[in-house]
Image (spheres, rainbow, N blue to C red):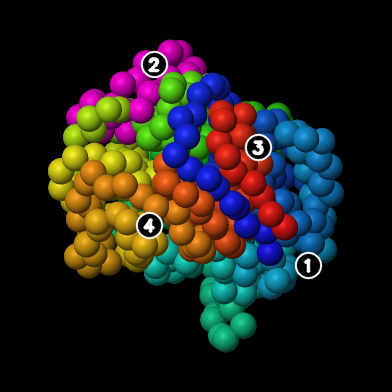
Amino acid sequence: MPKFIIKGGKKLKGEIKVNGAKNSALKIIAASLLSQEEIIIKKAPQIEEVNRLLELCESLGSVVKRDGETIKIKTEKIKTTDLNPDLVKKIRVSVLLLGAVLLREGRVHMPHPGGCAIGQRPIDLFVDGLQKLGAKVSEDENGYTFVADKLVGATFFFPIISVTATEFLMMTATLAKGRTVLKNAACEPEIPALAEYLNRCGAKISGAGTNTIVIDGVDKLSADIFEVMPDRVEAGSFAILGALCGDPIRVTNCQPEHLEALLAMFDRMEVPYEVGPDWLEVRAGKNLRSVNLVTHEYPGFITDLQQPFVVLLTQAKGVSLVHETIFEGRLFYTDKLAQMGAQIIMCDPHRVIVNGKTALVGRHLDSPDLRAGFALVLAGLIAQGQTVIDNIYQIDRGYEKIEERLKNLGADIERVE
């Protein structure tokens, strides 16, 4: 299994381009099954999670053609209503395909999904949403089976704000009969981008990007061209890299307005940065100040940037409290930072105290999940000595050729097979 070997302690300098958003690309791939026509997806990231979802679509009957960042998908017929268990266990977003298959075939079976091990991530909202739209569901040790002659619009209130569940029900409701109203919906930028595409294809969606989304079902959807937006998590991750060791680092092809929560933290920590229309330039701060952090749904501080931000807090003078409100257990990776010399106290599954500034030392570590894995890469880049990171498949799921892009900044990082 491949691993990263990092020799840290170097200042990094130059430009790094942000790729297409993973969380946008995955949703538009799922949306492609709502139509029998061919969709063209541009600026798609070439990452493992996208590759696995495309494989899953192919197993269902989709014809997929890929040329670099451009993907073409056409699904004239669904050849099976059973999602491949070997692929489903690798990616949790396989749940996104349930609605389209159910709408087209009246039945779909899905094994229990996989993905990152970051606490309890049940698919209750997806199940409850489909039941609200009229589906019947049964569960056994092999997974879930959904059956419905047709889906009918309904009002659904999300007891917990969920980005993926919001997008899933919004997509599914486009072909349900009648009106669907989604309340307490997520507002992340990827949601109105998806809605705008679906509306161009004949859907009737209003309110996407607000907490109430209204969908009037239509009989059929066409397909069109979709350009994936820049990945705001990747942009934020690279901005934090700049704050750690940039001399400076310019992050290009990004949308700074999507990172206002992070930039507000930079202001409080006294991180030096400049903002352009589609770029950020960030330099390592000499006297970083500690801050308290609470993750929150958009436009609050995104949970996917919490892990790299904690690495930054280890280099800030003072005591910081980090409160992870989205996923319990998503702070367990901090014990690996503690092995590198960080002074971190786990209060409970949702909170840690970070006491800085502390020098980090290279260690042999294992990547626990996608975002924590990249946080360990950041830690290795500023640590003294050599850091070895195993299980980097988790990192490859979300960051395309990350070692090559970091090398271009001057990092000493190697992928060893």
Rounded to the nearest whole Å, what is the CA distance between mark 2 and mark 1? 49 Å
Q: In this view, does 140 lie above or below 233?
A: below
Q: Distance between the residues labelled 3 and 1?
A: 39 Å
Q: Nearer the viewer, residue 343 or 76?
A: 343
Q: What stretch is highlighted in magenta?
A: 262-284
Disc 3 crowd, CA 10 A, few/some/many (<14, 14-19, 20+): some
Report if the CB atoms under discs 3 and 2 are less than 8 Å apart. Answer: no
Q: Give me the C-alpha separation between circle 4 and circle 1.
A: 48 Å
Task: Tell whether label 4 touches label 3 (CB within 8 Å).
Answer: no
In the picture of the structure, the residue carrying the numbered disc 2 is: 275
According to the image, label 4 marks what residue? 340
- Mark 1 element type: loop
- Of the residues under marks 3 and 2, which one precedes in the sequence? 2
Q: Which amino acid does label 4 sit on?
A: Met
Q: Nearer the viewer, residue 216 or 285?
A: 285
Give how far apart the Cα atoms at labels 3 and 2 are.
25 Å
Q: What residue type is labelled 1?
A: Thr
Q: Tag 2, which secondary structure?
A: strand
* Residue at the image point whose x is 62% and y is 83% from the top: 142
Residue 385, given in percent of the width and then of the height, sits at 47, 49
Which residue is at a point 30% across and 27% down the rendered structure image?
Answer: 285
Q: Give coordinates of residue 262: x percent, y percent.
A: 32, 33
**The N terminus sits in image quarter:** bottom right
Residue hosting label 1: 80
Nearest to the eye among marks 4 and 1: give it. Answer: 4
Identify the residue under disc 3. 404
Q: Which of marks 4 and 1 is nearer the N terminus?
A: 1
**In the picture, residue 402 is in which quadrant?**
top right
